[in-house]
Image (cartoon, helix red, strand yellow):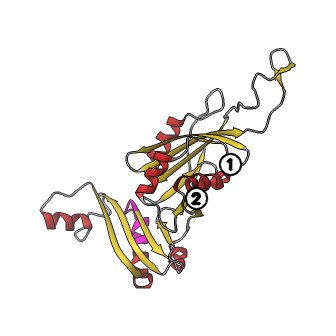
């Protein structure tokens, strides 16, 4: 089972936490008006960080008056009516508020996810492919808004001039296990920091940072984000299906979130 990551844009901006919460609060539980499929969705916010959307769905227009009985090898009347749909297919969607990243196991359902979020919030929604290199991101935006990074203490980032030691020296505290910093640049020209951002990229590759997320603005004043780890094209999970060839939703939640934390 593979999850692909994308960038979610709501109303020309990186999603606000209130938007993500409203998707969970007011999003429809049953969707029957989108093309041929009927959907039932289970929604939840996990750890005040992850929006989890689990859809069960199938084609509502595919029907046969007869079914084949596997025991007798004969046809018999279909016990289901045309108003009953067996929701056999599964779609899993996760949005990580901390890293501004959308994950789904079915890329061909992006248009439906876009429709569901847009219909819920009554806002324009885009689901875009992520930037695979920092250079591509820098060339697409002209302003920096925010930079957020997370460091876990390790051998690579506890030298004398590291953030860990600086924090300990300033406050007279022991070295922390983890530091999270968010810097607001307002709207600063990205050209001013291109070399610094490349240095951060090198430090991320050297394991000095656990994660780095950058948000910028393009010529049309549309926000764009870059996760310094987002060049990973997919996350593969080793999850077995049950006897009905279906995934257990709780198993998928546990395995994916363990990879994203």
Q: Residue at x 16, y 57 (%)?
A: 174
Q: Residues within 10 Å of mark 1 (few under 14, many from 20)?
A: few
The tag on residue 233 is 2
Relative vertical location of residue 208 with respect to residue 91 in this rendering, above or below? below
Q: Residue at x 40, y 61 (%)?
A: 211
Tell me where the magenta segment starts and ends, as one range.
200-211
Q: Is residue 208 magenta?
A: yes
Residue 42 percent coordinates (x, y) = 53, 39
Q: Nearer the viewer, residue 120 or 256?
A: 120
Residue 236 percent coordinates (x, y) = 57, 48
Q: Residue at x 59, y 64 (%)?
A: 128
Q: Is residue 85 magenta?
A: no
Q: Is residue 181 visible?
A: yes
Q: Which residue is mark 1?
A: 34
Q: Verify CB contact (< 8 Å) between mark 1 and mark 2.
A: no
The kind of secondary structure element at disc 2 is loop
Query: As drawn, is 192 to the left or to the right of 242?
Result: left
Q: Residue at x 52, y 65 (%)?
A: 11
Relative vertical location of residue 73 with respect to residue 186 in this rendering, above or below? above
Q: Quadrant of the N terminus?
A: top right
Residue 35 percent coordinates (x, y) = 72, 48
Q: Nearer the viewer, residue 150 or 159?
A: 150
């Amino acid at each position: 089972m593979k999850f692909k990551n994308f960038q979610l844009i709501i109303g020309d901006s990186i999603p606000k936490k209130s938007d993500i919460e409203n998707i969970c609060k007011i999003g429809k539980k049953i969707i029957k008006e989108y093309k041929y499929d009927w959907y039932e969705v289970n929604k939840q916010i996990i750890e005040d960080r992850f929006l989890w959307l689990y859809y069960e769905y199938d084609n509502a227009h595919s029907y046969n008056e007869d079914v084949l009985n596997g025991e007798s090898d004969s046809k018999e009347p279909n016990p289901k009516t045309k108003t009953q749909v067996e929701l056999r297919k599964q779609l899993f969607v996760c949005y990580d508020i901390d890293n501004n990243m959308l994950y789904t196991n079915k890329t061909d359902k992006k248009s439906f996810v876009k429709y569901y979020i847009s219909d819920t919030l009554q806002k324009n929604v885009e689901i875009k492919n992520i930037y695979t290199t920092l250079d591509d991101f820098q060339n697409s935006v002209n302003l920096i808004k925010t930079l957020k990074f997370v460091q876990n203490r390790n051998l690579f980032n506890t030298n004398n001039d590291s953030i860990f030691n600086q924090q300990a020296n300033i406050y007279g505290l022991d070295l922390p296990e983890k530091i999270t910093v968010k810097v607001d640049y307002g709207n600063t020209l990205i050209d001013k920091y291109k070399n610094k951002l490349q240095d951060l990229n090198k430090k991320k590759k050297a394991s000095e940072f656990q994660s780095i997320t950058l948000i910028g603005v393009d010529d049309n004043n549309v926000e764009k984000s870059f996760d310094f780890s987002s060049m990973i094209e997919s996350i593969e999970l080793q999850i077995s299906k049950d006897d009905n060839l279906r995934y257990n939703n709780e198993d998928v939640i546990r395995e994916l979130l363990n990879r994203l934390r």
